[in-house]
Image: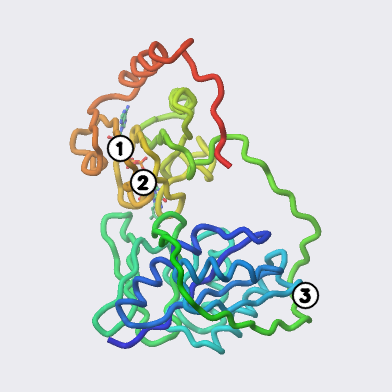
Amino acid sequence: MKTQHIGVFIEQRGGVLHDVGLELLGKARELAEVSKGTVSAFLLGRDISALSDDLIAQGADTVLLADSPVLEPYRLLPYTSVLAQACETCDPDILLFGATRMGVELAPRLAARLRTGLSAHCMDLRLDTEGKLLQMVPGWGGGVVATIRCPDHRPQMATVMPGVMKKLVPTERSGECIHLSVKEDLHRFGPKVLEVHIEEPKEMPLEKADVVVAGGWGIGNPEGWAILEDLATLLCGAVGATRPPVDEGWVSESRMIGQSGKTVRPRLYMGIGISGMSHHVVGMDESDCIVAVNTNPDAAIFEVSDLAVVGDYREILPPLLKEIRTRLPEGRIDTCELPQ
Ligand SMILES: Cc1cc2nc3c(=O)[nH]c(=O)nc-3n(C[C@H](O)[C@H](O)[C@H](O)COP(=O)(O)OP(=O)(O)OC[C@H]3O[C@@H](n4cnc5c(N)ncnc54)[C@H](O)[C@@H]3O)c2cc1C
């Protein structure tokens, strides 16, 4: 097997690392061990060199650091330019990005610049016997998992949703930090950021909730969502959704779970009126306990459920809510703390 040099783009904002970069470092480490290769973390921003030790502790052999005022805040064109230059210097065989808002605009632009391919929203990444990257993505409406290879062009590029891969536990490891030069005239490229407004979360963030009550097309109409909201509120949880209710505008896109939405691993996931297509299941099947309510006894979601309730949600949820209320002190939870 050919040795693979694996690069991971590390997303940070204001010096705070996004988890997805660390998750990808974990996967990159695994692939590097298989091919006896190495892992490089690509870290861009301003005053961020202190983050290098964390990246080495979590799997990187080398941190390629571009630290410059022109790289804060994030802007597409300067980041693409620095990453393209870094790829020319260190020539990675594989390059991984988180499928975040930043990653999904940066990775395709860089792939086009480097004249290589990119697989979006991979569920898994493996190496074949020659060391080439196998990129698993759901295809044909979620009915099959397609394996994509990029045989000729380098790097082999892929994006992965946050929460799909697992971070490594930090260990004491040694590594190297290489400073990349950044051209000062990069500030001239692309739109300028005049102001940044950070919105405080007003409701329970889906990815951090201990309980997720997710609704699907089987809810039937926007009014049906009220009972899901009630159940989620009672359990201090968050409401999630499949794609059809999002497409219909019943619920905002930020609530979508699955391959093109968020990945959740709550203690309790409740799937109401959801068939269980793989596009959705990849985003929730690692939940601790899965309860599904569906009128169809053969629904695929029951295959990943710990508790399968066959029936109409309009008949099942109202008595469930009543029962929960009778068991709660004063019939309700007063305050639910939003996780930081
Ligand atoms: C490239 C691509 C990416 C995609 N990404 C995502 C993604 O990230 N997330 C996602 O969710 N989907 C995604 N999809 C769509 C996905 O393939 C499925 O179409 C979708 O997940 C199905 O949603 P659903 O289960 O709500 O609807 P359906 O498949 O229509 O299922 C509705 C279910 O409700 C049940 N039901 C009906 N009435 C009731 C009732 N009264 N009580 C109880 N049960 C009832 C039915 O038996 C049925 O099983 C993607 C598709 C593509 C092509």
Kindly indicate the quadrant of the structure image that contains residue 53: bottom right
Q: Is residue 309 left or right of residue 138?
A: left
Front residue of this view, candidates 75 and 210: 210
Taking the view exactly as shown, the residue that stands out farthest to the front is: 172
CA separation in Å, label 2 and label 3 = 41 Å
Q: Position of residue 145 (x, y in %)?
A: 28, 62
Q: Earlier in the sequence, mark 2 or mark 1?
A: 2
Q: Position of residue 91 (x, y in %)?
A: 49, 87
Q: Mark 3 points at which residue?
A: 187
Q: Pointers 2 and 1 in contact (CB under 8 A)?
A: yes
Q: Name the residue under label 2.
A: 284
Circle 1: element type: strand
| Residue at the image point whose x is 44% and y is 85% from the top | 154
User: In this rendering, is residue 323 above or below 23?
Assistant: above
Q: Which of marks 2 and 3 is nearer the N terminus?
A: 3
Q: Position of residue 119 (x, y in %)?
A: 42, 70
Q: Which of marks 1 and 3 is nearer the N terminus?
A: 3
Q: Quadrant of the N terminus?
A: bottom left
Q: Mark 1 points at which residue?
A: 290
